Image (cartoon, rainbow, N blue to C red):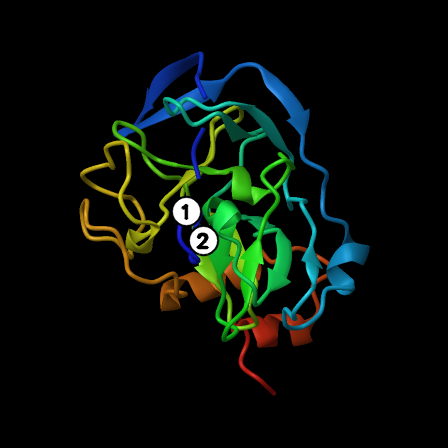
Amino acid sequence: MSATEVRASTSNTHEQHQSGDALTSFQLPTFAVCVGTTAAMLSALPLQIHEEQLIAYTTFVPIGTGISAIPNAGTGLVAMNSIPRYTWVGLYPGKATTRLNGKRAAHTMGSTRSGLYIIADKAIKTGVHMINEATTPYVANVWYVKLANGYVLYFTGASVASQEELLTCYSRSYGKRGYPVPTHCSDPRCIGAKHRLHSAMLKEWRKPLLANAPPGLSRAFLEAAGLLPPP
């Protein structure tokens, strides 16, 4: 992908079930569980991302890795327990840098900090950079937003069942896909199959995301992120 969003790679075995109108997938086998973010790690987070900062490959909820239901997508992430809507899943991990690397474009995420990108290591399988994009007939259940302090937050845009794969939308800046995108993307910033041009916060998300912020995040961090007004 380009210097804004996220990937794809090898094959799959999966079961599927109907959940309302959304087709979801149960991932077997689960290979590993992502390491959890601790309150100590959160309290130590810089208020804004800075060059050379390493953002941890951890998640706020138990997540497993397994073979994705998406054809040719390789590894994907699976919920180990049911996850309510508006739950913080994780921050996009990797190294914050001003230097782009063409060989790692598929795992490069832009930020709201001018000239700073977050580049994830594809060899590390624990982290939200491993969430695949929903393709027809699947529906995204995770959305991401670029916070005002440069971090990129992935959160559940819908309730997620235990063992359901986490899927997102990469936005229009991802470029040409080699697979069909859903005709109706679940991300409200998209219009049907026309993917969004931005990853900004919607006003209606602030209150529920603030209410579900992980313990350990300081008020100063939430203010810098744009979730709380400054004093």
Tag of residue 144 = 2
- Pick whichever of labels 1 and 2 is earlier in the sequence: 2
- The residue located at (32%, 35%) in the rendering is 139
Q: Residue furthest bottom?
A: 231
Viewer can see residue 80: no
Q: How far apart, in angstroms, are the residues tagged by discs 1 and 2?
A: 9 Å
Where's residue 144, x and y in %? Answer: 45, 53
Q: Residues within 10 Å of mark 2 (few under 14, many from 20)?
A: many
Q: Is residue 3 above or below residue 49?
A: above
- The residue located at (62%, 44%) in the rendering is 121
Mark 1 element type: loop
Q: Amino acid at mark 2?
A: Tyr
Where is the C terminus found, in terms of image quarters?
bottom right
Q: Is residue 224 above or below residue 80?
A: below
Q: Residues within 10 Å of mark 1 (few under 14, many from 20)?
A: many
Where's residue 50, x and y in %? Answer: 65, 71
Tag of residue 157 = 1
* Residue 128 left/right relative to 204: right
Where's residue 168, x and y in %? Answer: 40, 42
Q: Nearer the viewer, residue 206 or 128?
A: 128
Where's residue 140, x and y in %? Answer: 36, 39
- The residue located at (68%, 29%) in the rendering is 33
Viewer can see residue 114: yes
* Residue 29 left/right relative to 68: right
